[in-house]
Amino acid sequence: MTMAGLNMIQQALSIYDQDLRLVQCNRRFRLMFDLPLELTQPGARFEDTIRHLCISGEYGPQEDLEEAVRLRVEKALAFEPHYMERTRPNGRVISVEGAPLPEGGWVTVYTDITDSHRQEQLLRTRSELLSEQLLTRAEELAATNRQLQATNSALEEAKRELTGMEARIRLMTEMLPAHIAHLGPDRIYTYSNRRLSRIMPGRPAHIVGLHMADVLGQQAYQKVRPHLEAALAGRAGTFEFTDDATGRRIRTAMTPAESGAYIMSMDVTEETQTRAALAQTKRRELAAQVTSGMAHDFSNLLTIILGLQSRLDRMALPAAAQELVTATSAAARRGGDLLDRIATMTGGRDHRPAATVWSAFLRDFATLARPALPDAVTLVIEDEVGAQRLWLDPGMLQDSLLNLVLNARDAIGEAAGEIRLAARAQAGTWLEITVTDTGPGFTDRALEQAMQPFFTTKGREGSGLGLSMVFDMTQRAGGQMRLENAHGARVTLQLPWREAPRPLTPGLALLVEDSPDLRRSVRDMLVALGYSVIEAASADEALAIARDLPELVLILSDLSLAGGTTGLDLLDALPAQAPPLCIMTSLRADHPLYRAACARAPVLQKPFDQGHLAALLSPKEDRT
């Protein structure tokens, strides 16, 4: 249809690519220059066409044919816009207008302007009253107008290209998982890719023309302000801060500009949580290495002491000596308990998250905690989370909260008092749990050192490992812990907010595994569970399938994939509407990558059978 239209116009048109080969021409081009058919076919060489025109006399007599061809080819290779008018050997006058293309090559339009020239000549001969100068100016004006038309066409094409480029750049910036903006020296936003509300919920999406303090709020603005002033002064920098309104961790890079500064901000909350969990694991491994040898020797010594005390206990000793034997045995047993707690702190059990109904968890916890409190102490539970199904380690969290409640009980002592446990969701980022008591509160020294092992304010009655174990368990889950005084002691735990995966209805599943044999085995299990299966051998292949198949209900991926990528890399690259991703791995439970995966998705340990796979895809609620 396009060629039919081009063949209807009265101008000749040709398009050559960057290699000077014909891309397309219309019928008028062949007729105007009387070209043979082979020179008007796509792929015909420009050099051959010029040689034919020189031979046919289109450019007049030529002393050196090949030199004339070479000069015209070299001029064409420059790809410069041009406009000219020339008289052909047959007496016809044509205008030649050429414009380069962005991809290389050029398009040329040839227009027969013989009639226009004749009219100008007629005007010259019949208008004796007009001065020669006026005629000359009219001719110059006509030629200038034609050149302006050619220039305007080139400008319109450039404008179209720039508009398209701007649209593509804006589209790319708006698809990035980061907020990109420009601030003027007056702290007013002049550009934004409208992603701020995704990075920091609660902020407006349209912020151009607004002051930074009004957009972020005074609390967040004061944290950002010193770095912004440095950027406006010409010093680039990258920093992280916690947004108090949402609890999210934000990483921001500021780059000076000629007028103001560019800002890029990303939500690194999950990365920070995983980093904290991995750092705590490293600390635990180091502590285990340091203490394992001493604990072994100390355990042997305690065994010897208890054996000797048993022999003394069987002897006929005076009452005073018998009391010393009993006290020594009790001290040795207390040392054994201390060794067990050190082993728990340095080795500990694995973090085992499970689907947990929060309200049921709190009911079970209250059943365990209340009998341990004296009648004068009341346990009050305030729950703003409700029956949410959360992905957390119920056993580890129950141990932590029991430890905090018993510590609060000891702080209150014999007096009447209250222990209050409150739970709420913080901006979809944290599960925040606070335990407050009406006791005397923490001392200044306790606020600084209470989370360190062996620090205690209970004298000989305390081991100094209670709060440090709670801190350790919280860190292993990727959370954080805070101590403060508020009409008594207050301990705040913040755990990553992870909603538990819902039991899946069988449908189309994507299996990502680089081993063909293992992929075949897992596929058979999925099919037996009622799933239809599509396979991928790499993260790139899986990502392309996930983008093209919105009907997927499950992605089951190996943690270690071909090419050095991981299942977590695939998880980060998936689109927002992607289905749940479950991970399978043969890595040990103490491997850092295994722990990082557990913090972000359900994990299935290899080897597994169909029963294990069914339990992962349809998790039962853990109420304890």
Image (spheres, helix red, strand yellow):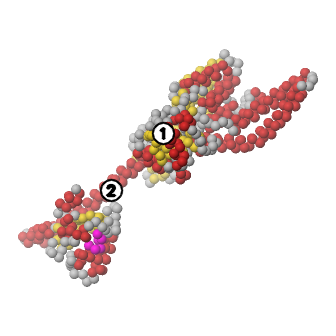
* Dot 1 crowding, Cα within 10 Å, few <14, some 14–19, many 20+: some
Q: Residue furthest bottom?
A: 63
What residue type is disc 2 on? Glu
**Residue at position x 45%, y 40% in the image:** 532
Asked which secondary structure carries label 1, the reply is: helix
Q: Image height check: is 126 above or below 432?
A: below
What residue type is disc 1 on? Val
Q: Bounds of the magenta span?
A: 44-49
**Residue at position x 62%, y 38% in the image:** 476
Residue position marked by numbered label 2 in the rendering: 161
State the image quarter where residue 34 is shown: bottom left
In depth, the one of 451 and 446 nearer the eye is 451
Which quadrant does the C terminus fall into? top right
Q: Is residue 560 magenta?
A: no
Q: Is residue 122 left or right of residue 60?
A: left
Q: Is residue 1 visible?
A: yes
